[in-house]
Image (cartoon, grey):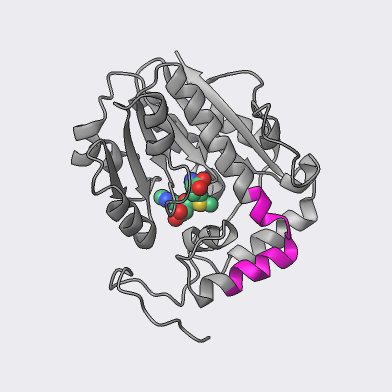
Amino acid sequence: MPSDHRPRWVPEHVDIDVPSAARMYDYYLGGSHNFAADRELAEEYMRVLPDMPQIARAQRHVLRRAVRHLAASGVDQFLDLGSGIPTVGNVHEVAAAANPDARVVYVDADPVAVAHSFSLLADFPQAAVIQADLRRPGAILSHPELTRLIDLSRPVAVLMIAVLHFVADEDDPAAVVATYRDATAPGSYLAITHATSDYQPQLARRAEAVYTRASHQIHYRTKQQILDMLGGYELLEPGLVDMIHWRPDPDSGADPLGGDVTRYSGYAAVGMHR
Ligand SMILES: C[S@@+](CC[C@H](N)C(=O)[O-])C[C@H]1O[C@@H](n2cnc3c(N)ncnc32)[C@H](O)[C@@H]1O
């Protein structure tokens, strides 16, 4: 497999011949922080799931709608787990539009995502990025950058957009979510999107097979399996729903997939714990 030339912004230890879930997502979103190996596997995935660019955009829209809603509700601290490679409408930008004092900590396992977030945030002292595995909450919750910016005794919005499906059953995603829940103050929130196998189970299995060659494997789940991860959270209306139905913007125009939820194959929810 041919490697791209190696741009200066790639951290030294990164093997650009291993497709990365973060850089593949950047490719679906039309970004330029990806390499030949990422694009090849992303193209293979899109042969299974041609709607992936629209799905990725829809998930970014959920992220923005959720952050806007939570910031308007008074939340001024955000912990974005699996934040990815920065793109249009990042959490600190959306949150700052509602509250200029909002603080944001980004966390991602991918070194390229972290390097880009780091350079983007150079002039933004109210946000930071941590390279870490979200399955190890202890290291994140006690990280000096987190404790510098986030006061865990006050409500925090924990964002897990398009990332819980990268946590395998063996890693007990419900327990991971519960650890963040228990570490955050009452009145804190969790926002998620998650890929589902409910509508097209065979296609979901084929899609999973493609990702076995990526840095992170994907796990499509049923609505009940996803609900089971949200224990202890009181879901805001309209609950765990098809992602395009989570508080859609009234002025967002025609849906690019004709509003066909089976093509999006993903759910969204925002919950609060008391
Ligand atoms: C599909 S992208 C979503 C990015 C972003 N949340 C968004 O909605 O645009 C998933 C991201 O989760 C990251 N990721 C996957 N597993 C992770 C883990 N265990 N810990 C931290 N980050 C993880 C990947 O590196 C990737 O950047």
Q: What percent of the width, then of the height, locates residue 189? A: 45, 24
Q: In the picture provided, is 274 more to the left or to the right than 243?
A: left
Q: Quadrant of residue 158?
A: top left
| Residue ID at (67%, 70%) | 44
The image shows residue 56 at horizontal and vertical percentages of 61, 50
Vertical comparison of 13 with 238: above or below: below
Q: Out of 262 and 202, give the one closest to the viewer.
A: 262
Segment colored magenta: 40-55
Q: Residue at x 72, y 45 (%)?
A: 265
* 23 within the magenta span: no
Residue 67 visible? The answer is yes
Majority secondary structure in the magenta region = helix
* Up-down relation of residue 205 to residue 92 (above or below): below
Which image quarter: residue 226?
Answer: top right
Question: Is residue 54 one of those drawn in magenta?
Answer: yes
Left/right placement of residue 113 relative to residue 238 reads left
Q: Nearer the viewer, residue 252 or 62?
A: 252
| Image position of 75 with respect to 132: above or below | above
Out of 274 and 53, give the one closest to the viewer.
53
Please state the total of marks drawn on the protein image. 0
Q: Residue furthest top?
A: 274
Q: Position of residue 134 (x, y in %)?
A: 39, 45
| 52 lies left or right of 161 | right
Specify whether 88 is left or right of 107: right
Give the quadrant of the C terminus. top left
Residue at point 69% right, 44% down? 196
Q: Give the residue at x 37% y 31%.
A: 96
- Vertical placement of 70 versus 127: above or below? above
Q: Is residue 163 visible?
A: no
